[in-house]
Image (cartoon, helix red, strand yellow):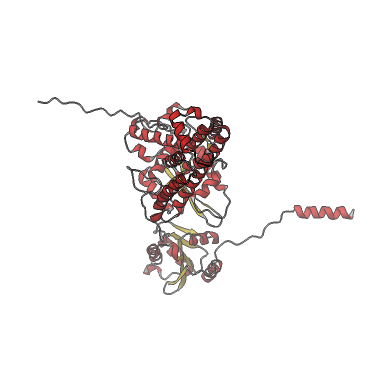
Amino acid sequence: MNFWDRYRKKLKKLSRKETPPKIDNSLDHKLDTNIDKLKKELGESSDLVVRHFELGEEFCVAAAVVYMSGLVDEKKVNNFVAESLKVEDSLKKVPYPQKSMFDIVKSRALSVNKVVVAAEWDKFLLSVLNGETAILVDGSNEAITANTKGGETRDVSEPSTQLVIRGPKVSFTESIGTNVALIRRYIKSPNLRFETLQVGSITKTDVAIMYLKGTANEKVLREVKKRLNKIEVEDIFESGNIEQYIQDNAFTPFPTIYNSERPDAVVGNLLEGRIALIVDGTPFVLVVPAIFIQFFQSPSDYYQNYLIGSFLRLLRIISYIISILTPSLYVALTTFHPQMIPTSLLISLAAQHEGVPFPVVVEVLIMEFTFEIIREAGLRMPRAVGQAVSIVGALVLGQAAVQAGIVSPTTIIVVAFTGIASFATPSYNIAVAPRLLRFLMMILAAAFGLYGVFVALFILIAHLTSLRSFGIPYLSPFAPFILSDLKDTLIRQPLWSLVLRPRLINQQNVKRQERGKKPSPPEKHEDN
């Protein structure tokens, strides 16, 4: 019985919820205590700047301005301090110096843009580490913080990954404020909404959600906020980190979230009802939801004649198919189905392959692997020599391999043609997928011929059909088939005929514009 009594007492003790001790998170009334605590938490960091002042004549009230030297704009700091600590002569003598002096400084500081009063220590510390300037007054347990972010940032420049012949030569930067301003220059509407949250328990990275109120899908918007709030990590450095945490399916080589460094491309997606995620510290903005055909659309398609834009878009799609299927079809035809090759071409291929010691699939795998090494090396080398080394390396290695009898000239042509076709895709994310799929399809082609190629192609299409991007089918408007949304997919119809927004993306404000009128030729005037 004594054993059971002790056992019951032990269970009650374990099941009893212990209330954690309450931690005081407020600022202290004493200025020196707050300054000492700040220096201690930052480890006496040398970039912490503390400037002491005395306010008033009869009652000298101590005050201090605190900021991180490398994160602020010195001009903004000086303006903020000058406006906040400029106390009029009539208010220098006050009956309650400490309390009234803080109120006076606060009223003066409110004239400066983006001023917040922080009463919690965590909020005050985060403001200082985020590039803001804080004013502390002795006798007050509150701090006045202002947005004085600055420091060295990159200027707005021309895009480096999404180049166009005709269109704006502007790209996003690493500053979230600059990126938001670039978008607002295009959309001058009060319906453009901007919400900010912080992700990362240590980095506290700012992530902005931008959308058009009344146009964006409310269900998708709630899902975006839900997934962002579920991210529990210490560090977020780039939008690619956010992308990996919020995407629907991680086990796919195809991107289900669109990213762009061009403001006009992001604005076009916002107007269609999509949602943009701007991450501080990166020039690439995420756009959700995304569909497969969206990655083949270039902003230049809409800046020129629709016939030319449609032709170029079809050319990109065909190039993408070539980059996936060409090596595997070459292996399958030469290994299993030579009867499908014209006789004269077959004799030429056989003569070229006469002195090569490897089968065709080994030739193609060797050259594809070599081409990938050259491409990756060209990206990592300094810009001045990277392109030259890539071109010279490919030419020298290809010529040397043919002369040494390791590969045939036709294999070099097939691999080079495939590599060039892969560069025609305007989005880098979608262009990476064929680089992985080619190797798998070549192995299946070497094992089963055309049967293996078509089985792999069938599995690939089924996989694409199963993908979702925030609940939107990845292959829409082809699967499910939506006839009205086909006007801006494989080809682009004239702008005046694009009346409706994508139906699955936007379900509230479907109508984009009134039905446009086809331009008519000018009237002919009779000569007198």
Residue 1 lies, in percent from the top left, at 90, 53
Which of 368 and 234 lies nearest the eye of the viewer? 368
Q: Quadrant of residue 294?
A: top left
Q: Is residue 505 visible?
A: no
Q: Residue at x 39, y 31 (%)?
A: 491
Which of 418 and 268 lies nearest the eye of the viewer? 418
Residue 525 lies, in percent from the top left, at 16, 26
Which of 99 and 281 lies nearest the eye of the viewer? 281
Q: Residue furthest right?
A: 1
Quarter of the figure with the C terminus: top left
Q: Residue at x 51, y 44 (%)?
A: 366
Q: Is residue 189 left or right of residue 4?
A: left
Is residue 453 placed above or below 33 in the rendered structure?
Answer: above
Q: Residue at x 55, y 33 (%)?
A: 456
Is residue 496 placed above or below 281 in the rendered structure?
Answer: above
Please count the marks in the image.
Answer: 0
Residue 188 lies, in percent from the top left, at 36, 44
Q: Is residue 401 visible?
A: yes
Q: Is residue 235 left or right of residue 263?
A: right
Residue 250 lies, in percent from the top left, at 56, 43
Q: Residue furthest left?
A: 528
Which of 11 and 516 lies nearest the eye of the viewer? 516
